[in-house]
Amino acid sequence: MERKLLIAGNWKLNKTIREALELVTLLKRSIRETQTVEVVVCPPFTALSETAETLLESGIQVGAQDIFWEEKGAFTGEVSATLIKEAGAAFVIIGHSERRQYFHETDETVNKKTKAALKNCLTPIVCVGETLAEREADKTFLVITAQLKGGFANFSADEMKKVVVAYEPVWAIGTGKVATPAQAEEAHAFIRKELSKAFGSDVAGTLRILYGGSVKPENTSELMSQPDIDGALVGGASLEAPGFTEIVRNAALGRRPIEEL
Ligand code: PGA
């Protein structure tokens, strides 16, 4: 079953509108692989609209870094799926570990946000992953299972088909400590097996699972050559055009044709 590679840049709290436009203007020129690799950039809310406009017809898509689950109303400071869609987003990152850690997001809020994204035809990129303490206590698989169960509670197989999962071990995010390809593959294969049990092998076989955590040009192809790794969620290395371009290129080179896996 063909799973198209997906490389998403998570800019986090970086880039003014001007800086965002400078970056995507460069990416538009330098990224050549959008036929074989789906490429997404996720700027802060303020730069969404202009970034999306600049990227029209470039083959590079745009995502937001979060949404609230309600459509509208008295929710000061929040942004809905409808609003980011209007601004040009096709994707949205949900439940990133920084949101879980600093903004008290739970599997329940992840569940509501993911439902809201799907209702508005956005592709949610739902993040799961264990902390260092959890890994050292041998709880990695327990933690991931709970995040999947809670995050996707009451989801139908049809809904799940439209979801992208990102495995991001918290200890690898922004630390320079990348998971080894074997460690990442082990977690990805586990996630796929769990999703297969819950939603069937059809869904698990087509759903994409991205790896995130200190992805750089030098480690991309080896990670992408693992059978259950279908792309990357890139933080720090997505902020400069040459590095992000090289990650997309190396991903395309690293990915073996599915029939060889
Ligand atoms: P990093 O971040 O690539 O800077 O480690 C990844 C992420 O948080 O999505």
Image (cartoon, grey):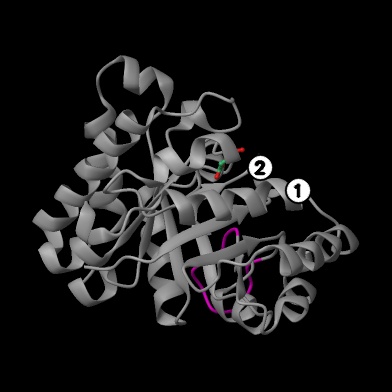
Amino acid residing under circle 1: Glu
Taking the view exactly as shown, the residue that stands out farthest to the top is 136
> Cβ(mark 2) to ligand 1 < 8 Å?
yes
Amino acid residing under circle 2: Ala
Q: Could you classify mark 2 by the number of other residues whose Cα lies within 10 Å: few (under 14), some (14-19), or many (20 or more)?
A: many
Nearer to me, 116 or 45:
45
Locate the N terminus by quadrant: bottom left
Residue 159 position within the rendered picture, expressed as x and y whole percent measured from the top left: 28, 74
Contact (CB < 8 A) between labels 1 and 2?
yes
Against 239, residue 200 (above or below) is: below
- The prevailing secondary structure element of the residues shown in magenta is loop
Nearer to me, 234 or 246:
246
Q: Secondary structure at mark 2?
A: helix
Residue 173 position within the rendered picture, expressed as x and y whole percent measured from the top left: 54, 33
Residue at (39, 18) in percent of width and height: 133
Q: Disc 1 designates what residue?
A: 240
Quarter of the image for residue 138 reads top left
> Cβ(mark 1) to ligand 1 < 8 Å?
no
Residue at (38, 70) in percent of width and height: 115
Residues at marks 1 and 2, CA–CA distance in whole angstroms: 7 Å
Nearer to me, 220 or 170:
220
Residue 220 position within the rendered picture, expressed as x and y whole percent measured from the top left: 50, 42
Against 159, residue 154 (above or below) is: above
The magenta segment is 65-75
Q: Quadrant of ligand 1?
A: top right
Determine which of the numbered discs, if any, sits on residue 237 in the image: 2
Determine which of the numbered discs, if any, sits on residue 149 in the image: none
Quarter of the image for residue 114 reads bottom left
